[in-house]
Image (cartoon, rainbow, N blue to C red):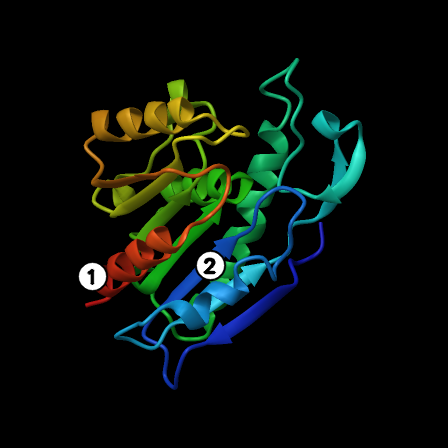
Amino acid sequence: MPDLDCIVIETGDNPQGTVIWMHGLGADAHDFEPIVPMLQLNQSLRFVFPNAPVRPVTINGGMEMRAWYDIDLSNPTVGTDDIRESAEDVRALITAELRSGMRSSQIVLAGFSQGGVIATYLGLRYDERLRGIMALSTYLHDHEHVAEEVSFASIDVPIFMAHGIQDPMIPITRAITARETLLGLNYQVEWHEYGMGHQVCPQEISDIEQWLNRIYA
């Protein structure tokens, strides 16, 4: 698979960290770009928004769209190979940041919906400590077996989780299951829920801002 094309935004000179932020199903790298100017950040950060590959998606009748993995409700494990491939593509983005002079401990993996699945999948397995993991309106892939694959380096990485209580796409119960799985493995999870659907709301953006300022303090 070719390297992921990305939009890169720096909020100032000499960024002190990098946030690699994956979009949801059918969206693209521009999806969360407008949020960056809304964040009142204490440190200059680099935001990297990659585009997922275009692929047929079973749940949408085989229509081709940007997707990190296929979804087939009749076979919940169908996307596993795609998820592994997409995680490796995002790992390559981390490697590029390391080559540019960032340390792994300066890098946050973030994602919304499908993108959050990739952020948590790679973040929990990455073999060096990251700065944080941001999981928005998402769930853990194959949560029953996560404990078998997590890396020792990830165990004290702060995790920000946020979900809409009226989410019709990914019910909040799936996110709560993910949260309880992570807490059971002694991860530090900061949990937020909002009166919204499958989206992002102003209060969530404010909470993201505070979390980023805290972990990059």
Left or right relative to 127: residue 20: right
| Image quadrant assignment for residue 212 | bottom left
Q: Amino acid at mark 1?
A: Arg
In the image, is residue 59 above or below residue 94? above
Where disc 2 sits, the SS reads strand
- The numbered mark, 1 or 2, whose residue comes first in the sequence reads 2
In the image, is residue 202 above or below residue 56? below
Dot 2: few (<14), some (14–19), or many (≥20) neighbours within 10 Å? many
- Of residues 168 and 174, which is closer to you in this image? 168
User: Residue 88, how many percent across, how many down?
Assistant: 55, 46
- Of residues 37 and 180, which is closer to you in this image? 37
Q: Is residue 37 visible?
A: yes
In the image, is residue 55 above or below residue 215? above
Image quarter (top left, top right, bottom left or bottom right) of the C terminus: bottom left
Left or right relative to 102: residue 50: right
User: Residue 32, how many percent across, how many down?
Assistant: 52, 59
Please give the name of the residue rendered at 67% of the width and 44% of the height, measured from the top-left corner: 26
Quote the CA–CA distance across marks 1 and 2.
18 Å
Q: Name the residue beneath numbered marker 1.
A: 214
Q: Nearer the viewer, mark 1 or mark 2?
A: 1
Q: Name the residue beneath numbered marker 2.
A: 20
Please give the name of the residue rendered at 44% of the width and 68% of the height, measured from the top-left corner: 36
Where disc 1 sits, the SS reads helix
Q: Is residue 126 visible?
A: no
Tags 1 and 2 touching, CB below 8 Å = no
In the displayed orientation, state which residue is furthest to the top.
74
Please give the name of the residue rendered at 53% of the width and 28% of the height, measured from the top-left corner: 168
Dot 1: few (<14), some (14–19), or many (≥20) neighbours within 10 Å? few
In the displayed orientation, state which residue is furthest to the front.
195
Left or right relative to 157: residue 55: right
